[in-house]
Amino acid sequence: MNTISISELKINPSLAILQSEDYPLAIKSRSQTKAYILGKSFFESILSFIEDRADRNAVSKTDFKQKVSFEKVAKELGV
């Protein structure tokens, strides 16, 4: 994982953002990780994964034998 100190971040925030495009960038202070910077596309991929996972879980927990329509579940999920 790439790392950058808080001092380096203050001096050149654009470089930190550039370095975080493909993989998270750890922000360190006194050798301890204090935060992470995520690039836009990486962050959006994580959100998409989480939303898809939540949707799959909701559908798998729905008991369609009790005459709950898929359309109703989809509408509740905003799909």
Image: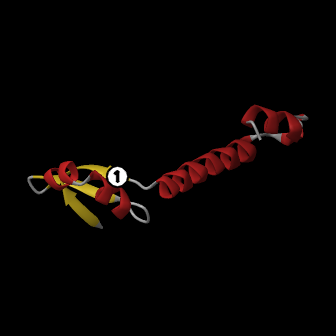
In the rendered image, the quadrant that contains the N terminus is bottom left
Please state which amino acid type lies under the numbered disc 1.
Answer: Ile
Towards the viewer: 78 or 68? 78
State the residue at coordinates (75%, 36%).
Answer: 78
Q: Tell me if 63 is positioned left or right of 58 in this view.
A: right
Q: According to the image, what is the colour scheme of the structure?
A: secondary structure
The answer to whether 78 is drawn above or below residue 50 in the figure is above
Towards the viewer: 30 or 4? 4
Q: Tell me if 71 is positioned left or right of 41 in this view.
A: right
Q: Position of residue 34 (x, y in %)?
A: 21, 47
Residue highlighted by disc 1: 37
Q: Position of residue 25 (x, y in %)?
A: 31, 59
In the rendered image, the quadrant that contains the C terminus is top right
Q: Residues within 10 Å of mark 1 (few under 14, many from 20)?
A: some
State the residue at coordinates (40%, 54%).
Answer: 38
What is the total number of numbered labels drawn onto the structure image?
1
Residue extending farthest to the left is 30
Q: Position of residue 22 (x, y in %)?
A: 44, 65
State the residue at coordinates (32%, 55%).
Answer: 14
Q: Position of residue 49 (x, y in %)?
A: 59, 54
- SS label for mark 1: strand
Towards the viewer: 40 or 67? 40
State the residue at coordinates (54%, 51%).
Answer: 44
